[in-house]
Image (spheres, grey):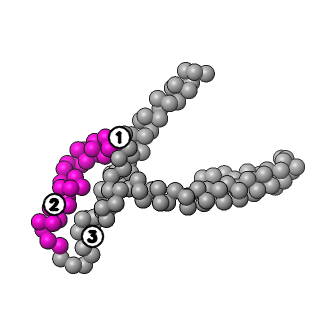
Amino acid sequence: MGRYVARRLLQMIPVFIGTTLIIFLMVHVLPGDPIRAMWGDKAADPAQVASLRHEFGLDQPLWKQYIDYMADLFKGDFGKTFGGRPVSEEMGMAFPVTLRLAAVALTIEMIVGIGLGAWAGLRAGRAADTGVLIFTLIVISM
């Protein structure tokens, strides 16, 4: 059992690296320049743009940006928003709302899940049981 848990924990490492790499690359593939977007339709001063690109590390090669990003993540530094506020502060403000949303979703899930599970259990092997199974698989997939 211990070997199984250790193996599963070790499998989390490439999954974590792969997931962060995919998300990181997806953000960089998006069209537009986040620094220029700070000015909207107004013309931006090239010196300010260069200064902000350097401050956020966007003037570095992509591989260096990813290494720096991962190093900061492991230190617990999630960086700053383009508005200058720490991301951890933004996350802290959203956390209470996220907890309430999760509690409501869990309550609805328990009520609907237990209800449908009991209903399908009473009709085992019938069309209703299969329908609930298919509905559950679709909802889980979403």
Q: Is residue 126 above or below residue 70?
A: below
Residue 115 badge: none
Dot 3: what SS? loop
Magenta part, dominant SS: helix
In magenta, the rendered stretch is 44-73
**Is residue 19 something that shows in the picture?**
yes
Instruction: Residue 62: say if magenta.
Output: yes
Q: Is residue 87 above or below residue 5?
A: below
Which of the two marks, 3 or 1, is nearer to us in this view?
A: 1
Closer to us: 122 or 76? 76
Residue under pointer 3: 38
Task: Identify which amino acid the numbered label 1 is placed on.
Answer: Lys
Residue under pointer 2: 51
Residue 75 badge: 1
Left or right: residue 136 compared with residue 9:
right
Q: Residue at x 38, y 56 (%)?
A: 87
> Outermost residue toward the bottom?
42
Closer to us: 48 or 122? 48
**Is residue 21 something that shows in the picture?**
no
Q: Residue 50: percent from the left, percent from the top?
A: 15, 61
The answer to which quarter of the image holds residue 31 is bottom left
